[in-house]
Image (cartoon, rainbow, N blue to C red):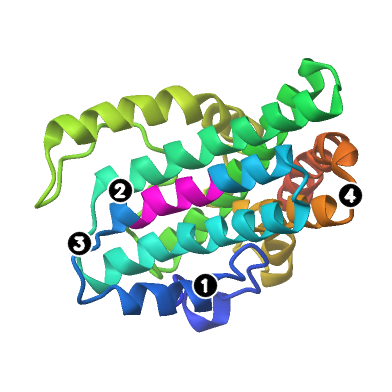
Amino acid sequence: MSKLPKEHQFVDLSDYGRPIARVIANSLKNTKYTPVDVTIAFVISGLIGIYCIFEEYYWASAFFLIFKSILDAADGELARIKETPSYTGRFLDSISDILLNLIIFISLWYLTEVHIIWALLAFFGIQLQGTLYNYYYVILRNRFNGDTTSRIFEDEIPTALAGEKQYNVTLLFKVYKALYGIFDEIIYALDRNASKGKPFPNWLMSLISTFGLGFQLLLIAIFLVLDLKIYIIPFFIGYSLFVFIFIFIRKIFY
């Protein structure tokens, strides 16, 4: 089920793995496996992908990075199917994503011998990209009641849902804020009135969906199989300039 009403649905280029994710989630519906188990599985897949980069098994690394992206969607699908939403799973998912991204770019720094500053700048850039995409997407979901389960920015410790412990939720929330807070603050400072403007057109959201983690991992996979890993870091630094271009378009026209 889409998270937006039909008239506001857009082609989400970062969500290409959703059909397979649903198959995986449905296959686990009547098993003992939980959404958190699937989250752990995508962490393992991501780490295997990184190991394959070191060993120069680029096709294998591409497979495991894309599979990680698919499992990243499958944990949420499984939570919906089993009707077991949890803040524990939600924050663990996001924390795992950012840590894996950091490891990927540190690995690329090590293998390509670029300056560490450039690797960290590329990592900062992809996180800023992802934050802008999530910011605009959640605004749409909240505005049109397609989905109101997500907040534009996480500012308060949520109350634990049934089946999870408040201690775990509080701890993971604090880790989440420590890792993501700076990106939220930057994007909000750049476009604090986004929720008050006109609805974002579908074509613009499709372009911005290239900032989603799924599409970012797909791009990294393509660079790897083409044996162009030395260009991954400079590409994502340059592509981060589109954060400002998309915000400019949103402010001027919408």
Magenta-tinted stretch: 38-46
Residue under numbered circle 3: 84
What's the amino acid at mark 2?
A: Gly
- Does the rendering let one see residue 155? yes
Front-lying residue, 205 or 175:
175
Labelled pair 1, 4 in contact (Cβ < 8 Å): no
Pair 4/3: label in front: 4
Looking at the rendered image, the quarter that the C terminus falls into is: bottom right
Residue under numbered circle 1: 18
Point out the tag, 1 or 4, that comes first from the N-terminus. 1
What's the amino acid at mark 1?
A: Arg
Q: Quick check: is 169 in the magenta stretch? A: no
Q: Quick check: is 39 in the magenta stretch? A: yes
Residue at 77% x, 17% y is: 116
SS type, badge 2: helix
Pair 2/4: label in front: 4
Does residue 229 sit above or below 45 in this rendering?
above
